[in-house]
Amino acid sequence: MKGDPVGILVGSNLKAAVMDGTKDVLVEFYAPWCGHCKKLEPIYKKLAKTFATIDSMLIAKCDGTANDVNVDGVNMEGFPSIYFWPADKKDFPTTYDGDRTLKKMTKYLVKNAAIKFELPKSKKQQEKDDKTVKEDL
């Protein structure tokens, strides 16, 4: 899909992407037929859009049914399976098993990212900050 903020990984580029020491990497391994994966898709796209301006973060997905997933530590027992590789610890990923909400996944990435960053403010937060500044003048 054009303009999709979620990176697409396949068997041939998966290992290189997750082992990139300049990026914290979150990958959703999905199955096209999986109802849970379909439910997660809009949330995952919003997550990727939230982090789109953070050069040190890659939010990606990989079709676990169509690709050879030959990466240490990845053991898909069901779909979706979500794994995180911090930039400073590529030997073994952590499994994301928290709530699949935008808020919880964002908090997880902010807390666990090896490369610290500041998320851009939402339009709503920026408007609130602007209003506060004007009131203080």
Image: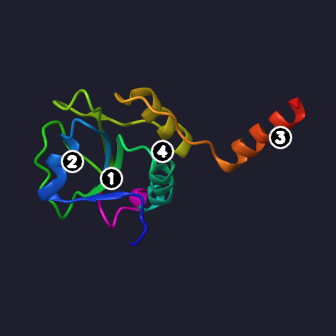
Find out whether the residues at labels 4 and 1 contact each other: C-beta distance under 8 Å.
Answer: no
Mark 2–mark 4 Cα distance, whole angstroms, equals 23 Å
Mark 4–mark 3 Cα distance, whole angstroms, equals 33 Å
Per the image, the residue denoted by label 2 is 17
Q: Choose the circle earlier in sequence order: 4 or 1.
A: 1
Residue at 14% x, 51% y: name it: 69
Q: Helix or strand or loop: what does disc 1 sit on?
A: strand
Magenta span contains residue 100: no
Q: Which residues are magenta?
A: 29-37
Above or below for 1 versus 96: below
Q: Choose the circle earlier in sequence order: 2 or 4.
A: 2
Per the image, the residue denoted by label 1 is 60
The residue mark sitting in front, 3 or 1, is 3
Q: Choose the circle earlier in sequence order: 4 or 3.
A: 4
Tell which of 50 and 63 is nearer to you. Answer: 50
- Residue type (three-letter) at the residue carrying disc 3: Lys
Mark 4–mark 1 Cα distance, whole angstroms, equals 15 Å
Above or below for 7 versus 100: below
Q: Quadrant of the N terminus?
A: bottom left
Find out whether the residues at labels 1 and 2 contact each other: C-beta distance under 8 Å.
Answer: yes
Per the image, the residue denoted by label 3 is 131
- The label on residue 100 is 4
Mark 3–mark 1 Cα distance, whole angstroms, equals 36 Å
